Image (spheres, rainbow, N blue to C red):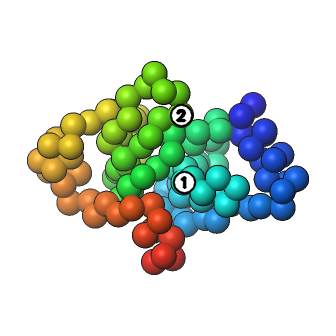
């Protein structure tokens, strides 16, 4: 329901999201209305995107999407989350030390979400 509200409000204000394709059909979207970034998948119907929150930093490869997320519900824990692209399972929150020492995650170049759009 939240996505329909966001989409409807975008139609009213004439704002459209800016998009950068990531991998496996996922994309990073910036909504000009609020300046926030979300990871969206074609089958995603939630207003908070795949990670149910806004993206502060993000990186990806063919196996993972790794993101530092500010969760929409303030009772949830902000931090690093990883999406396993094979199983579509989200792991997190993850300690920053684990992000740096995990063999797969430590190889992923994570940048501020805004920088992803600058290199578009």
Quarter of the figure with the N terminus: top right
- Looking at the rendered structure, the secondary structure element under dot 1 is strand
- In the foreground, 48 or 105: 48
Q: Is residue 109 left or right of residue 114?
A: left
Residue drawn where x is 38% and y is 55% of the image: 57
Q: Residue pushed farthest right? A: 12
Residue drawn where x is 14% and y is 43% of the image: 97
Residue 72 badge? 2
Residue drawn where x is 60% and y is 57% of the image: 35
Res. 62 visible in picture? no
Mark 1, residue position: 37
Q: Residue pushed farthest bottom? A: 119
Q: Where on the picture, by quarter, is residue 110? A: bottom left
- 29 is higher (above) or lower (below) than 6: below
x, y (%) of residue 22? 48, 62
- In the foreground, 118 or 103: 118
x, y (%) of residue 98? 16, 41
């Amino acid at each position: 329901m939240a996505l329909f509200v966001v989409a409807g409000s975008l139609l009213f204000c004439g704002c459209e999201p800016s998009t950068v394709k990531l991998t496996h059909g996922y994309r990073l979207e910036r909504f000009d209305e609020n300046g926030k970034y979300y990871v969206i998948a074609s089958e995603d119907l939630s207003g908070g995107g795949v990670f149910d929150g806004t993206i502060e930093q993000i990186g990806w490869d063919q196996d993972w999407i790794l993101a530092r997320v500010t969760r929409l519900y303030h009772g949830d824990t902000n931090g690093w989350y990883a999406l396993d692209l094979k199983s579509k399972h989200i792991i997190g929150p993850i300690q920053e030390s684990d992000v740096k020492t995990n063999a797969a995650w430590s190889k992923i170049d994570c940048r501020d979400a805004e920088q992803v759009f600058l290199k578009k």
